[in-house]
């Protein structure tokens, strides 16, 4: 209750800053630390819904009679739903009242999670996962909202803080889902998430600033079409979106099939133990915060190059899995740190370009994230079925090399100025 009261007071201060503000005055409104942390918590809880299934793939495969080669579809269709939500829902943040949009999506997420929890067949399961992914994009509406409220010279730090909440949500999702699955079965994971999401939606309805509509008035079809127009007009969006596709494909190549060798002999780890690997990636939160500060100082390109190199090298210890689990732990720490560093640098550069279109910029960028994540999930389980864990590591390293070479060939096209 004390934490909630502090958050409420912080949001109250934000309301004084932004209530009834015009777009111009909203642009210069400061985002307090308390409000940024509130956004981080909300983002973490929402994005966790997308990742609960990763440690549960083997159990789902057994219950619904899905092969190890195709069970990656559970993650893949969730990412497809996420991609559709990015295109169809996130741009609405530039047109509609963000408070109502955020609360409405959260309430619909409760229904989607209950559908997954009671799914009697694999068809209903996959349909429910699509809906879960579709509605989880509320996290990106919150990121764009935070960027709008933040002072320009602190925008990278604000994005980094909110993104750190997303990272922690992803990591805790794997740990919590593994533990709950071992204790009460995999369906309990989604029932518990539905209850938590309902609580969060209630808190957001009470505490989010009652901000007026932000942005220019236009029809919904034009709003969606303008997402693609921004790709034509903004080179930084095109370049950083491709990087997002590659880095998130690399990450899901690591995480999606990981449960398969770890749950099989000689390791035979439980879901709880597999989920604990997510905690090893907590350094990713440090990467997000550090990258935000560096981006504010004009060092986004520098952190991008360093992080991409770390991502590539981290596949070497991962390939030593059958010699030592420590190699995989090192890989997870390095990979999450590198991924979130590039991700925050990407967003910091993109969100500088068009203040009036931040939700659409976020949507366009994150669509590529979703494509990369879905592709990595599906392809990695196929590769594991035919080439084992070494094949998975070779695939991840190949994508990492591609990302590094792409950045080297395009870095001169992206401005890197402190704001």
Image (cartoon, grey):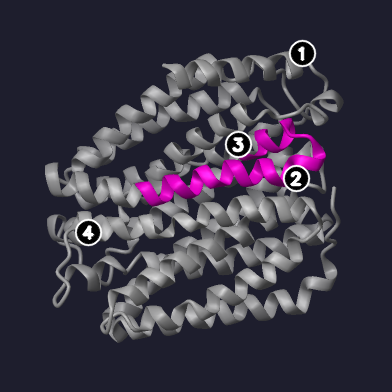
- Please tell me the numbered disc located at residue 226: 2
Residue placed most toward the observer, 221 or 180: 180
Which of discs 3 and 2 lies nearer the camera? The answer is 3
Element assignment for label 2:
helix
Q: Disc 4 to disc 3, how far (Cα)?
A: 33 Å
Which of discs 2 and 1 lies nearer the camera? The answer is 1
Would residue 75 be found to the left or right of residue 234 on screen?
A: left
The x and y percentages for residue 13 are: 68, 16
Contact between labelled residues 3 and 1, with CB atoms less than 8 Å apart: no
Residue 373 in magenta stretch: no
Contact between labelled residues 2 and 3, with CB atoms less than 8 Å apart: no
Q: Of callouts 2 and 1, which one flags the residue occurring earlier in the amino acid sequence?
A: 1
Q: Disc 3 to disc 2, how far (Cα)?
A: 17 Å
Q: Label 1, on which residue? A: 20
- Please tell me the numbered disc located at residue 273: 4
Q: Disc 4 to disc 1, how far (Cα)?
A: 50 Å
The x and y percentages for residue 281 are: 43, 59
The x and y percentages for residue 261 are: 23, 73
Q: Does residue 225 appear in this view? A: no
Magenta stretch: dominant secondary structure: helix
Q: Label 3, on which residue? A: 141
Q: Which residues are magenta?
A: 143-172
Which of discs 2 and 4 lies nearer the camera? The answer is 4
Q: Of callouts 3 and 2, which one flags the residue occurring earlier in the amino acid sequence?
A: 3
Q: Disc 2 to disc 1, how far (Cα)?
A: 26 Å
The x and y percentages for residue 165 are: 51, 42
Would residue 390 be found to the left or right of residue 207 on screen?
A: left
Residue placed most toward the observer, 123 or 300: 300
Q: Of callouts 2 and 4, which one flags the residue occurring earlier in the amino acid sequence?
A: 2
- Please tell me the numbered disc located at residue 183: none
């Amino acid at each position: 209750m004390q934490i909630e009261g502090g958050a409420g007071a912080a949001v109250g201060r934000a309301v004084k800053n932004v209530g009834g503000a015009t777009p111009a005055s909203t642009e210069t409104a400061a985002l307090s630390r308390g409000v940024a942390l509130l956004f981080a918590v909300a983002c973490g809880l929402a994005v966790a819904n997308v990742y609960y299934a990763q440690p549960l793939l083997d159990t789902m495969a057994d219950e619904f009679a899905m092969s190890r080669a195709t069970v990656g579809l559970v993650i893949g269709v969730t990412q497809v739903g996420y991609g559709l939500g990015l295109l169809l829902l996130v741009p609405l943040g530039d047109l509609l009242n963000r408070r109502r949009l955020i609360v409405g999506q959260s309430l619909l997420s409760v229904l989607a999670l209950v559908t997954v929890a009671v799914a009697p067949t694999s068809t209903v399961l996959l349909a429910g996962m699509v809906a879960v992914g579709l509605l989880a994009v509320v996290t990106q509406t919150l990121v764009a909202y935070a960027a709008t409220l933040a002072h320009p010279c602190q925008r990278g730090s604000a994005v980094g803080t909110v993104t750190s909440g997303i990272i922690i949500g992803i990591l805790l999702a794997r740990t919590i889902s593994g533990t709950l699955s071992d204790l009460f079965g995999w369906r309990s994971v989604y029932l518990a998430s539905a209850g938590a999401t309902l609580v969060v939606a209630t808190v957001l309805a009470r505490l989010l600033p009652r901000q007026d509509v932000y942005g220019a008035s236009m029809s919904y079809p034009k709003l969606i079409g303008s997402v693609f127009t921004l790709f034509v007009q903004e080179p930084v969006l095109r370049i950083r979106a491709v990087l997002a596709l590659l880095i998130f494909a690399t990450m899901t190549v690591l995480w999606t099939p990981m449960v398969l060798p770890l749950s099989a002999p000689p390791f035979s780890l439980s879901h709880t133990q597999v989920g604990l690997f997510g905690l090893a990636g907590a350094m990713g939160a440090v990467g997000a915060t550090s990258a935000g500060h560096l981006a504010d100082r004009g060092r986004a390109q520098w952190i991008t190059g360093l992080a991409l190199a770390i991502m590539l090298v981290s596949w070497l210890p991962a390939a030593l899995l059958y010699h030592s689990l420590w190699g995989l732990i090192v890989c997870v720490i390095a990979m999450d740190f590198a991924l979130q560093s590039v991700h925050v640098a990407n967003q910091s550069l993109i969100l500088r370009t068009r203040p009036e279109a931040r939700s659409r910029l976020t949507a366009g960028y994150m669509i590529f994230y979703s494509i990369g994540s879905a592709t990595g999930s599906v392809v990695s389980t196929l590769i594991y079925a035919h080439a084992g864990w070494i094949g998975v590591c070779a695939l991840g390293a190949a994508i990492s090399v591609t990302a590094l070479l792409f950045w080297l060939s395009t870095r001169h096209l992206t401005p890197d100025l402190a704001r």
